Image (tube, helix red, strand yellow):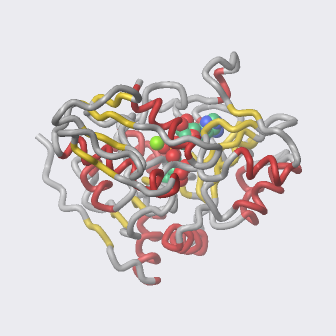
Amino acid sequence: MRQLVIMTIISNCTASALKDAAASLIAGNLVAFPTETVYGLGADASNQQAVARIYEVKGRPTYHPLIVHISSINNLDKWAKDIPEYAVKLARAFWPGPMTLILPRTDLAKDFITGGQNNVGIRVPSHTVALGLLKEFEAQGGIGVAAPSANRFGKVSPTCADDVKAELSDYFSSNDLILDGGQSIVGVESTIIDCTNATPMILRPGAITAAMINNLLGIQIEIFSKNSSDKMRAPGLLESHYSPKAKVYLSGTPEPGDGFIALSKFPTPDGAIRLVSPATNEEYAKTLYQGLRLADSKNLSKVIVVQPSGDDISVAICDRLQKAAE
Ligand code: TXA
Ligand code: MG
């Protein structure tokens, strides 16, 4: 039987709390921390044992690569080499922010980070607690923090500290920590861009949209689709993900007692249980995962969703909903 672990949630992330959390990472413990997208489950990316615990706590297969989080573009060439010019432009324009670049790795990015691939995912998050933690971690001699979303494998990403606790506290040790930085403002995971070829490709849509990238680079960026023959590009992006226990349906009319998620302009059908009612697509992204979690806490078996439309963050919302519905 598992021992009961009393989880430490640090809700007042002062400079001294971040110093302690960084020291805990250096000592090989896990620290879950807020980012503007979703909460991450962090470990020292240079410490194989610490990284192994991420996989254990998440219940994630070990061939799935992890994103390394750094405090600034200045540290990028520690982890990545042969960085194309377009990737530097992307990093300058959108970091710190909700974007991950996949780049050829240096020797620092070991197989236990990259899943044995020759490239590595790097992100500079913008949340002040995340950046503060990373800066302090680097000041104490760390080089990067590996962090997947802080949920069990295949489940819905957490967007607040209590959701991290609900997902992972059974698997944490007493030295692990959760930093509470409030509700994540974006609400869906970062845009992942493959920068290992002559032209970039979006592997996972997010708040940095294709239109934003096209405007910056003056190109038409490709978006990875399931039909692409090059499966190497997107490990971990293909299977069912982001799934609540309730079955998610992207069409149909809810019956009484079913959950319902849609923009506020869509009235709640008779007898359906409104889970969230966002006014805008941005608010839809921010509240989507809360809505899916609420379905589970209410023990609903079905959730009917009306997908948003447009070429903004709704592309990311529809991507996650389609995976949740698989
Ligand atoms: O917003 C985010 O990106 C959050 C926060 C915590 O930063 N992180 C996140 O990590 O979503 P994760 O591990 O839950 O999802 C990252 C995805 C995985 O599907 C992984 O397989 C893929 O990115 N990935 C990571 N490194 C990769 C690489 N080198 N090549 C291809 N895919 C990679
Ligand atoms: Mg994830």
Above or below — where is 132 with respect to 97? Answer: below
Above or below — where is 229 with respect to 76? Answer: above
Query: Residue 111 placed where, x, y %?
Result: 60, 36
Quadrant hosting residue 316: top right
With 224 as the anchor, is 136 left or right in this view? left
With 104 as the anchor, is 117 left or right in this view? left
Query: Residue 101 placed where, x, y %?
Result: 69, 47
Above or below — where is 136 with respect to 234? Answer: below
Residue positioned 66% across, 24% down in the render: 232
With 84 as the anchor, is 49 left or right in this view? left
Quadrant hosting residue 279: bottom left
Quadrant hosting residue 152: top left
Residue positioned 67% across, 30% down in the render: 224
Query: Residue 42 placed where, x, y %?
Result: 46, 56
Whether residue 15 is visible to the viewer of this picture, yes or no, is: yes
With 91 as the anchor, is 189 left or right in this view? left
Q: Decide which of 27, 224 is in the foreground and name it.
A: 224
Q: Which residue appears farthest toward the left when viewing the image?
A: 1
Task: Pick the quarter of the image with the C terminus.
Answer: top left
Residue positioned 50% across, 42% down in the render: 308
Task: Pick the quarter of the image with the N terminus.
Answer: top left
Residue positioned 82% across, 34% down in the render: 197
- Give the number of callouts: 0
Whether residue 150 is visible to the viewer of this picture, yes or no, is: no
Q: Decide which of 76, 163 is in the foreground and name it.
A: 163
